[in-house]
Image: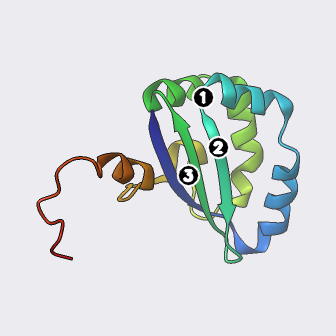
Amino acid sequence: MTRVCFQLQVDPDRIDEYRRRHAAVWPEMLRELEASGRRDYSLFLRPDGLLIGYYETDSVTRSDAHLAASRVAAVWEEHMADLFVGRSGRADQTATVLEEVFHLEDQLANIGESDPNEGER
């Protein structure tokens, strides 16, 4: 399983519209996201328009390919395009992916392994 976090910039003047459109995402788009293999998908929006998205998937490549080939996703992305700053192309294909640098469960799972620095803290 892979965790993916990404960043986009919503036009600060269009935040209310962005929220309105996401209050009731089209059912066919929700099903398409699910069919692409994305789980635990969340979006977080700052008041200045910084948008952070997160999802989990077994294959980023397969998920991306599924959505890239989806007519529903293409129409949804076209419907959303006017809300983003500096986007050329589909936002779902041009978002900045953020590197994961910490995950609590991963580190907790490694506690049992020998830690050469243990006791030096």
Give the x, y percent position of residue 82.
73, 56
Q: CA distance from mark 3 to mark 1?
A: 17 Å
Residue 90 seen from this side? no
Q: CA distance from mark 2 to mark 1?
A: 14 Å
Q: Which comes sooner in the sequence, label 2 or label 1?
A: 2
Tell me the SS state at disc 1: helix
Residue at left offset 35%, top offset 59%: 101
Between 74 and 25, the one nearer to me in the picture: 25
> As shown in the figure, which amino acid type bears the numbered disc 3?
Ser
Kindly report which numbered mark, 2 or 1, lies closer to the viewer in this rendering: 2
Farthest-out residue, left: 116
Quadrant of res 36: top right
Give the x, y percent position of residue 87.
57, 56
Label 3 packing within 10 angstroms: few (<14), some (14-19), many (20+):
few
> As shown in the figure, which amino acid type bears the numbered disc 2?
Tyr
Give the x, y percent position of residue 34.
68, 28
Pointer 2 with pointer 1, Cβ within 8 A: no
Location of mark 1 (residue): 67
Tell me the SS state at disc 2: strand
Tell me the SS state at disc 3: loop
Between 108 and 65, the one nearer to me in the picture: 108
User: Residue 88 got which mark?
Assistant: 3
Kindly report which numbered mark, 3 or 1, lies closer to the viewer in this rendering: 1
Residue at left offset 85%, top offset 36%: 26
